[in-house]
Image: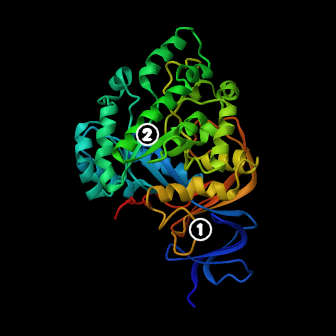
Amino acid sequence: MAKADLVIKNCQIVTPTTTFTGWLAVREGKISALGDDDSPPAAHETIDGRGHYLLPGRVEPHIHLGVHYPFDQDVEQTSAAAIAGGTTVMMPHNRAKASYLEVYPRWERSIAEHSYCDVVIHLQIQNRQHIDEIPLYHERFGVLCYKLHLDYRAREVAELDIEPLDDGDAYLTMKQCAPFNGLVALHCEDVEIVRYTLPAIQATGRKDLQAWSDGRPAFCEVADIHTMAYLSELTGCRIVVLHLSTADGVDAAARWTKVPPILETLVQFLTVFPEEAGKRIGAIGKMNPPLRDRANGERLWEAIRRGAIATVGTDHIACEKHETDDLWSVTAGMPGIEVALPLLLSEGVHKGRISLQQLVHVAALNPARLYHIDDRKGSIAIGKDADLVLVDMEAERVVSPETTFSKLKTPANGMTVKGWPILTIKGGQVVYRDGQLLVKPGIGRVLRSYP
């Protein structure tokens, strides 16, 4: 029998259904064999896992590229941080004013030249032309998911130089996506209410992180979920509620059973809380939707345990946030792709909130299934791409720009986190080991949800 290209032995292999001590073999970039004995096949390279845990590479369902940095640069720096954190597939919600028929091929070339990760591109609907061209984006590029930012009005529209969208645009987008079973991804916050609640809080002079949460109250998310779920049922189009911040939103979505909304929450909403993090990270924790309290976070963990939440992302956006007390001027949004898996291990698995199997589902298998790449990605199984991460579950460090590969401030700044990747494999190749990238950029490719 021909030698395997790579064998990882003496490790705890984590699948969607079980964890077992054994070995894994790779040939031509694919998982070729698994075993629970002490006799792995001969290989050109053998790695001793030393009892550490071998997980599928994390699949990140929600990031942004090219917002604060040039697209090429952002692809490279974000994918490098992803690989360092055990993420091997990332899914940006890309945006442009021009037709995506023109822009998409440029993104494909950039990713081929600059990315360390494989990439599934979601498209942000920015104008009526984009809505009209959705069938072409699906046909030519295999795009499954289309995002609507209905929370942008007035000031945001001027700052970002985009056209405002409304519920009518959401309805039309759903009608366009329903025939091919596409997904419409939504930022659910009733911005018409926020237009009144946020200035009222600002007028009090408050600058604490909790003020941002109070100015964008949870019921705004709940109200918009009901509106979008109703349009989903009318059109027959599936919707994804992005970055769900409230447990009340989980309950709201559960009321719509004809076309059930698919729920994504963020690592931040599970692990970072304004009443505790305010002193630690201050206005750096500003994001939309805002951080909620710990009690809400515990209810979100419970929703994961019972399968109500499908995926956990980060809404990562690379930006350098400087220490400031001025909540109202700092940019909303934060990086986090590098610390996502460690936070889920530390706050989820180590503290008994979820099992390793539940982590594998929400962090890898479910997003791969949802976006139609689970034939290749998302789990450890024979025939799947050998995208893997070896984790030292006992490694512990305090998160800071000095202890992370990206050198960016994240919502986990100052937290002691237990469970860190020590080795990342993409396509059967060791690409990261002990804090060092071992390859040059350009090993990633665009994956299409439809062939």
Q: What amino acid is labelled 1 in the image?
A: Ile
Question: Image height check: is 33 above or below 206?
Answer: below
Residue 35 versus residue 408: which sits nearer the camera?
35
Pick out the residue farthest to the bottom: 1
Amino acid, disc 2? Ala
Q: Is disc 1 in contact with disc 2, using a CB cutoff of under 8 Å? A: no
Image quadrant in which the C terminus is located: bottom left
State the residue position of label 1: 380
Nearest the eye: 375 or 81: 375
Q: Residue furthest top?
A: 204
Residue 412 vs residue 179, the one in the foreground: 179
Local packing at callout 2 (Cα closer than 10 Å; few below 14, some 14-19, many 20+) is: many
Pinpoint residue 370: horizontal percent, then vertical percent.
47, 55
Which mark is on residue 229?
2
- The quarter holding residue 185 reads top left
The residue positioned 34% from the left and 26% from the top of the image is 157
> Which of disc 2 and disc 1 is earlier in sequence?
2
Q: Position of residue 59 (x, y in %)?
A: 53, 55
Q: Residue at x 30, y 57 (%)?
A: 141
In this view of the protein, which residue sits in the foreground, 39 or 110?
39
